Amino acid sequence: MADTPSFAGRHVFVAGGSSGINLGIAQAFARAGAHVTVMSRSPDKVQQAAEGLRALGAQALGISADVRDSAAVDAALRQSHARFGDIDVLISGAAGNFIAPAKDLSPNGFRTVIDIDLNGSFHVLRLAYPLLRKPGASVINVSAPQGVNPTMYQVHACAAKAGIDMMTRVLAMEWGEDGVRVNAIAPGPIADTEGMRRLAPSPEALADAVASVPLQRMGTLEDIAHMALFLSSPQAGYVTGAVIPVDGGSSLRGGRDMRASYTPRGAA
């Protein structure tokens, strides 16, 4: 990665870091010299992710924990802190989503997305706070365009991501006096991710997603990782409370119509 800022010896903690966008971010920091901890639910996936980071030359730790379990998150953060010291960069990116109209969405389905995305983000940020480097830490939430754009069949994700965006702004205000910056990245359609497999499950839906992007291409994992590196670098030292779309301009057109991608439960 050309002109990548150095994070040599810095401690980066990535919640939800065993796959997709979050793993791409973890890999970028590993290449930049950071000590990286990835936390995710699956023990196998998180260990595989950590091994991959070590193959890139990084000191890396993989810890299995569910963001919905505050005690498990607290233990993971403290284990990481004991290994690598104060956290310089905190990435909170655990998420869950699916397509469903509100009339067919069960209370448990709504609750699950809120619990993973919004409550899970609060657990990670709140419990990491005592362990952050002060001053100097960079906190980044991974949000989504649904936090700003009303999107049909996404009432659960819209509610969760709007909460994350507002939490980002509030914590930027509260933690600013400690020299801690809090920002969010809102990725658009990103290729080769579980999110796109869920939200664009057919070739037709994928083509529609690409057509909605002014730049007329899918984003890449590197596109999101570049922004995370920038936000955590001295070049962004006066940036806090920002929710930055990295979406090729797709959010300028509002929420994407996902009705054609919905398959009712039990349908062939």
Image (cartoon, helix red, strand yellow):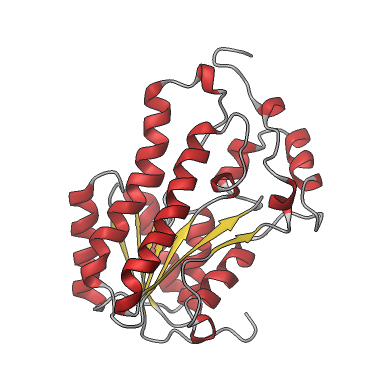
Q: Tell me which corner region of the image, top left, top right, bottom left or bottom right, holds residue 198.
A: top right
**Depth check, front residue: 232 or 264:** 232
The residue located at (38%, 60%) in the rendering is 170
Q: Nearer the viewer, residue 42 or 243?
A: 243
Q: Is residue 234 left or right of residue 212?
A: left
Residue 13 drawn at (x, y percent): 35, 67
Whether residue 41 can be seen here: no
Quarter location, residue 18 = bottom left
| 71 sits to left or right of 188 | left
Placement of 43 over or under 137, stated as above or below:
above
Q: Quadrant of the C terminus?
A: top right
- The residue sitting at 49% across, 81% down in the picture is 238
> Does any portion of residue 221 appear in the rendered image?
yes
Residue at 52% across / 40% down in the picture? 158
Name the quarter where the N terminus is drawn: bottom right
Quick check: 154 above or below 173?
above
> In the figure, residue 214 lies in which quadrant?
bottom right
The number of callouts visible is: 0
Residue 99, position as x, y percentages in the image: 57, 30
Drawn side of residue 33 relative to residue 263, left or right = left
- Residue 82 in the image: x percent, y percent? 18, 73
Q: Position of residue 102 (x, y in %)?
A: 53, 23
Q: 41 or 133, which is in the foreground?
A: 133
Q: Residue at x 67, y 37 (%)?
A: 200
- 239 relative position to 109: left or right: right
